[in-house]
């Protein structure tokens, strides 16, 4: 049996990050994490700030994503995101300082503040970045 | 006859100007390449997004999102967004936009009850502030353009629309066709009117998708993104167009300078020769008179 593959295309406003054949994809949708395998039904979902990992030749690769969405059709997977960072490209120190900044800011604010959501998102992004960066080591 | 000294001075100043225009041309050429790369890089994202969006919007009720479809009530207040550059010396780049904006405002004065103006870029603001009331203006965002700035701008336009400060949004900008030509484009940005689906697309539209979370929620999440991406693309195009226009303008200015230097040098040499001839004549006639 010929091995089925998914064609993964990851696009941001600045450039095309990935355009590769992969075996398996896992991502964080707005309704929770989901996995994609070849032969998936047509599917359209928005993505939260979260992690996307894909398996290629038995190796898992991880990326940190900002807002976006994913479209699946005939084994073509198109992921449109605002930003995407590969695990080995993440600046851990920067993410850590962003985490601290966001935490400090959140402590001073209440949930009603306009800025609250902004910092909450920043915090989430920083956490995901660190989480993904940690995975790059044991890939 | 202009004297030698003044011609020489003139040649010097034209030479200096030529040097400046030549340098500006080089700088613009370098910036243009970068801007062009950015436009090309942003294209797939924008295309993919509108592709999905139109497919989605086609199959949902128009009333699903406030951004979609024309407003029921008398919609006659308009926001005109005018995109120009921050700096001059780029030929007709800004002049065309300003002229078109002026024309639009004059022609539609009676059609709409109110036209608000938003300018992006200093040049447009400088032109329009004396003639009309400018509602909001932004400058200095194009020199260091990133997606976040464009997104913030998009959010602002959308929130104004949702709060019913205006019922339609039109945007006027220079579309980057090639280095030599920028086309002044006026498009309606809001409300979004789904494009009529072509034959080819109808086949695609028949595919049943699994939507998560629900079709309606997806549409209302994607529409604002679409506006942001559009603004980002428009700003990128405008920046690329600006550099292109400047490069062409500076190129022709450099050419003119070279030509002028040639003409002035000719005039200078003529004047010099004339002076020598006169001097010779004086000496000869002086000698003649002594002899005689």
Image: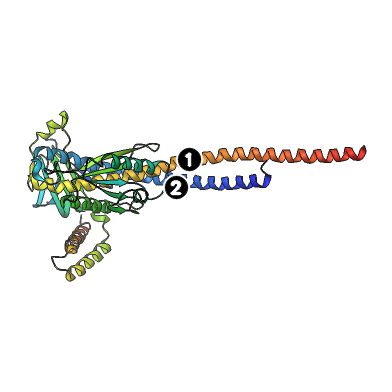
Q: Chain of mark 2?
A: B
Residue that protrudes farthest toward the front in the picture:
B110
Q: Earlier in the sequence, mark 2 or mark 1?
A: 2
Classify mark 1: helix, strand or loop. Answer: helix
For label 2, the residue is B27
| Quarter assignment of residue B97 | top left
Relative to A139, say whether B34 is above or below.
above
| Residue A60 visible in the current orientation | no
| Quarter assignment of residue A3 | top left
- The picture places residue B274, in percent across and down from the top left corner, at 73, 38
Q: Residues within 10 Å of mark 2 (few under 14, many from 20)?
A: some
Relative to B169, say whether A116 is above or below.
below
Q: Chain of mark 1?
A: B
Q: How many marks?
A: 2
Q: Quadrant of the N terminus of chain A?
A: top left
For label 1, the residue is B251
- The picture places residue B123, in percent across and down from the top left corner, at 37, 49
Front residue of B81 and B242: B81
Classify mark 2: helix, strand or loop. Answer: helix
- The picture places residue B204, in percent across and down from the top left corner, at 13, 33
């Amino acid at each position: 049996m010929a091995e089925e593959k998914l064609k993964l295309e990851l696009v941001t406003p600045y450039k095309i990050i990935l355009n590769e054949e992969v075996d398996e994809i896992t991502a964080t949708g707005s309704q929770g994490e989901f996995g994609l395998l070849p032969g998936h039904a047509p599917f359209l979902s928005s993505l939260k700030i979260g992690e996307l990992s894909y398996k290629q030749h038995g190796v898992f690769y991880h990326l940190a994503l900002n807002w976006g969405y994913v479209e699946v059709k005939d084994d073509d997977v198109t992921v449109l995101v605002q930003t995407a960072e590969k695990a080995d490209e993440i600046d851990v120190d920067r993410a850590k300082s962003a985490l601290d900044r966001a935490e400090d800011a959140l402590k001073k604010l209440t949930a009603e503040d306009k800025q609250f959501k902004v910092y909450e998102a920043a915090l989430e992004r920083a956490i995901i970045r660190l989480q993904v960066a940690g995975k790059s080591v044991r890939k | 006859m202009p004297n030698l000294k003044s011609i020489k001075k003139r040649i010097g100043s034209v030479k200096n100007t030529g040097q400046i225009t030549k340098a500006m041309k080089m700088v613009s050429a370098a910036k243009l390449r970068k801007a062009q790369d950015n436009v090309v890089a942003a294209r797939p994202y924008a295309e993919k997004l509108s592709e999905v969006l139109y497919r989605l919007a086609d199959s949902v009720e128009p009333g699903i999102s406030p951004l979609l479809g024309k407003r029921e009530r008398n919609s006659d207040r308009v926001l005109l967004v005018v995109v120009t550059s921050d700096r001059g010396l780029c030929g007709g780049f800004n002049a065309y936009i300003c002229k078109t904006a002026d024309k639009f405002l004059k022609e539609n004065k009676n059609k709409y009850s109110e036209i608000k103006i938003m300018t992006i870029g200093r040049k447009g603001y400088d032109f329009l502030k004396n003639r009309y009331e400018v509602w909001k203006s932004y400058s200095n965002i194009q020199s260091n353009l990133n997606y976040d700035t464009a997104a913030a701008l998009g959010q602002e336009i959308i929130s104004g629309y949702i709060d019913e400060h205006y019922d339609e949004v039109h945007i006027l900008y220079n579309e980057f066709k090639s280095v030599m030509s920028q086309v002044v484009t006026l498009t309606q940005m809001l409300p979004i009117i789904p494009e009529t689906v072509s034959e080819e697309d109808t086949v695609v539209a028949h595919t049943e998708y699994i939507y998560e979370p629900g079709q309606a929620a997806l549409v209302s999440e994607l529409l604002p993104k679409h506006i942001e991406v559009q603004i980002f693309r428009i700003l990128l195009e405008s920046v690329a167009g600006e550099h292109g226009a400047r490069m062409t303008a500076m190129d022709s200015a450099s050419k003119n300078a070279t030509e002028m230097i040639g003409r002035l040098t000719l005039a200078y040499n003529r004047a010099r020769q004339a002076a020598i001839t006169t001097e010779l004549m004086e000496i000869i006639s002086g000698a003649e008179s002594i002899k005689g």
